[in-house]
Image: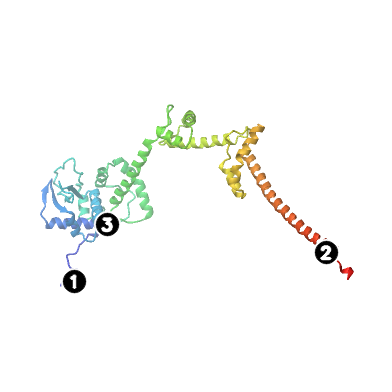
Amino acid sequence: MQSSLIPERPLIISPTLAATIGLEEAVLLHVLSELMAHRPGIERKGLTWLLLEQQALLDALPFWAWIDIRRVQKNLQDLGLILVEARAGQEDGWYIAINQRPADDATPLAPAEPTPVTSAKVAMVAAGKTTEAGRGTAGYIAPDWQPGDEWLSLCRQHGVPDAFALERVPGFVMYWRDRAQSRFSWGNAFYKHVLREWRQEQTRRGAAELETTMSANWQPSQDAIDILCNAGINETFVEDAVPEFVLYWRERGAQNGTWNTRFIEHIRRQWARYKASVVNDGVPRPISENWQPSAEVFDVLRLAEIDEDFARNKVPEFVLYWRDTGQPQASWNTRFLQFIKYSWARRLDAGAATGLTHARDKQSAERGGQSLEATFRRFTDRSWAE
């Protein structure tokens, strides 16, 4: 009697196959084999090709989203276990074939197709019949372990040279022997390890190809000059700094792929030092006709609780006085701060003195009034005559 909890035919997955190529990959491979067994296919190039649409795959794999199906399908393609061709004129239909043929079938594929893995050993592993060791059980990696030709062939499909892959064998073996972990397929682990190393090597090579030594006739790009000019840096200053920059890096023989970026950073530092040296060189100079205090001056005045409008109104008087005297000063900002603080203090003192004078006058008036009243009473007193 069939259980109501299992209303349809269950999926039976080989544990050895799942350990070899991955559980999700084994599920998809098994489902594809079931579909090919119950649906008519097309015999071509020694393989059976089945036309599958997106909805057919979603119906066969209801526990996965479409993005998951495509991801696992891509993994099987990378392993060389399935071949996929797009159907002409259709965006949701594909011809899919399991890349396994009889050992005596030597029918070549077209050059545009991915190179199939025809090794009998890989075919047996994909079918779940054996592991690399031929025992169907997991095992530790051997001290003299070497990848089989089928795994090197898979690496070659991704453009990985055999020499590059074989150079990684000693480190791979040492790493897994130190970890003392067992696996069903050391070849599959090595294949993934080599692909990861190859991608990292390609990234390093790409960066290294961009790096160049400083040439004697190097010039910054126009984009770099525009960036510096937009930052308020004088273009003549930028041009004058190029020979020094080139000489500095040529003597060091360093390589870099971003000379323009480094030049921009160098010019910004030099410009900041130049501006600071011009403003704070300590050389006394006469005040200019259009001199104005810097923003830092007003920041200091605000901290001292001195009204900013009061300070700005004093600028013309300050400039006029010092232009008439013609005396040079090393720092006009400092001199202006002293002048404003002195003027502000005098303003406060004047206000206080005015208030005090007014109070004294009032008090004197009050005292005067009382004295006059007392004198009047004294002169008009007639009590002695009573």
Q: Quadrant of the N terminus?
A: bottom left
Q: Earlier in the sequence, mark 1 or mark 3?
A: 1
> Which residue position is annotated with label 3?
19
Q: Quadrant of residue 16?
A: bottom left
Residue at the limit of the structure toward the bottom, as seen here: 1
**Residue tagged 2:** 377
* Residue 33 shows in the view: yes
Residue 254, image x, y percentages:
45, 34
Query: Under tag 2, what secondary structure?
Result: helix
Is residue 264 rendered to the left or right of residue 301?
left
Q: Residues within 10 Å of mark 2 (few under 14, many from 20)?
A: few
> Spatial distance from mark 1 to mark 3, Cα to Cα?
30 Å
Q: Amino acid at mark 2?
A: Arg
How far apart in space, not on screen, are marks 2 and 1 (Cα)? 128 Å
- Under mark 3, the amino acid is Ala
Cα distance, mark 3 to mark 2? 127 Å
Residue labelled with disc 1:
4
